[in-house]
Image (spheres, helix red, strand yellow):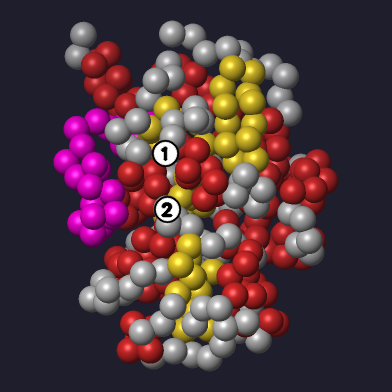
């Protein structure tokens, strides 16, 4: 099978538009990329329906579809000090949280999985809503607390909100690993050389953006909506790092850890004991072993 057109889902967040700018504007690719730019929870839903060939997704969702998609080495949002926050109008005790109405930025997000892991002993029913609505929902009393992601990490104090728990710090304390938030996955139906070309292209696109940030600025700004340039820059600096260029052994171990916990909680039962390689890197390693064994 050869692929002449490939659907590619990315979010409008500054880290994604920064990372993918060069790849989306290249003219020398052996296939056409059809970009779909949407909130990550919308991308999650599209991937669940099998509507995207390659996409940015929440790592919690990647676990659920690992039988159909491989995790690429490049393009991830994964690191330390970058996790979702549980916010409220006041700091809430654990007991208060257990009896609270809590908003989440989508049922398939890593934020939702982290809340489930954090509140493991409590039977909570969080309320999914668009991530950008959560701060106002808390302030208006529609919910008691909310798990926030993206730029709200930088602005919540200005809005009068209080952090009850940093789920990223909680993850790091309990696992010793960086936190996998979102990654790029490619359908297993695609030819191996096409997947490798896309993965390599993402890495080259990150290198281009890092060396030529001015070239990406307009593309980032257009999709960042009302976010200030200062917040855009902080967003990119936090979520685009060495793990974005390559997951590496540490990054892959962190993703496996998250997948394993997701399986244990029933968030994605399919991943438990799945026989296929989860990562493109593992596929390449297997191919090299087969070549050397000939």
User: Is residue 64 shown left or right of residue 243?
Assistant: left
Q: Which residues are magenta?
A: 261-282
Q: Which residue is mark 1?
A: 48
User: Residue 75 appears at what percent x and percent y?
Assistant: 53, 42
Q: Position of residue 207 (x, y in %)?
A: 64, 39
Q: Secondary structure at mark 2?
A: loop
Question: Residue at image x 46%, y 67%?
Answer: 127
Quarter occupied by the C terminus: top left
Magenta residue check for 268: yes
Please tell me whether residue 264 is drawn above or below residue 52 in the rendered image. below
- Is residue 153 visible from the viewing direction of this image? no
Q: Let me know if residue 264 is in the magenta part.
A: yes
Question: In this figure, which residue is indicated by the disc labeled 2?
Answer: 108
Q: Dots 2 and 1: beta carbons under 8 Å?
A: yes
Q: Residues within 10 Å of mark 2 (few under 14, many from 20)?
A: many
Rendering quarter of residue 178: bottom left
Q: Is residue 42 left or right of residue 249?
A: right
């Amino acid at each position: 099978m050869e692929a002449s057109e490939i659907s590619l889902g990315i979010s409008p967040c500054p880290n994604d538009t920064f990372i993918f700018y060069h790849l989306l504007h290249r003219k020398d690719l052996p296939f056409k990329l059809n970009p779909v730019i949407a909130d990550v929870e919308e991308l999650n839903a599209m991937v669940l329906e099998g509507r995207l060939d390659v996409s940015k997704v929440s790592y919690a969702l990647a676990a659920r579809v690992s039988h159909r998609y491989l995790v690429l080495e490049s393009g991830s949002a994964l690191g330390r000090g970058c996790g979702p926050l549980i916010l409220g109008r006041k700091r809430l005790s654990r007991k208060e949280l257990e009896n609270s109405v809590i908003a989440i930025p989508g049922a398939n997000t890593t934020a939702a999985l982290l809340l489930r892991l954090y509140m493991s002993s409590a039977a909570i029913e969080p309320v999914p809503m668009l991530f950008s609505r959560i701060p106002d929902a808390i302030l208006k009393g529609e919910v008691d607390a909310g798990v926030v992601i993206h730029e709200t990490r930088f602005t919540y104090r200005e809005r009068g909100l209080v952090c009850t728990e940093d789920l990223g710090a909680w993850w790091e304390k309990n696992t010793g690993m960086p936190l996998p938030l979102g990654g790029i996955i490619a359908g297993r139906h695609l030819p191996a050389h096409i997947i490798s070309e896309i993965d390599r292209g993402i890495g080259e696109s990150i290198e281009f953006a890092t060396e030529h940030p001015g070239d990406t600025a307009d593309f980032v700004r257009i999709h960042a909506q009302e976010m200030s340039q200062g917040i855009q820059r902080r967003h990119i600096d936090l979520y685009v790092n060495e793990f974005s260029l390559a997951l590496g052994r540490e990054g892959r171990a962190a993703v496996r850890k998250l997948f394993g916990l997701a399986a244990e909680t029933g968030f994605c039962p399919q991943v438990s004991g799945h026989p296929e390689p989860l990562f493109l890197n593992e596929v390449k390693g297997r191919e090299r072993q087969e070549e050397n064994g000939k």
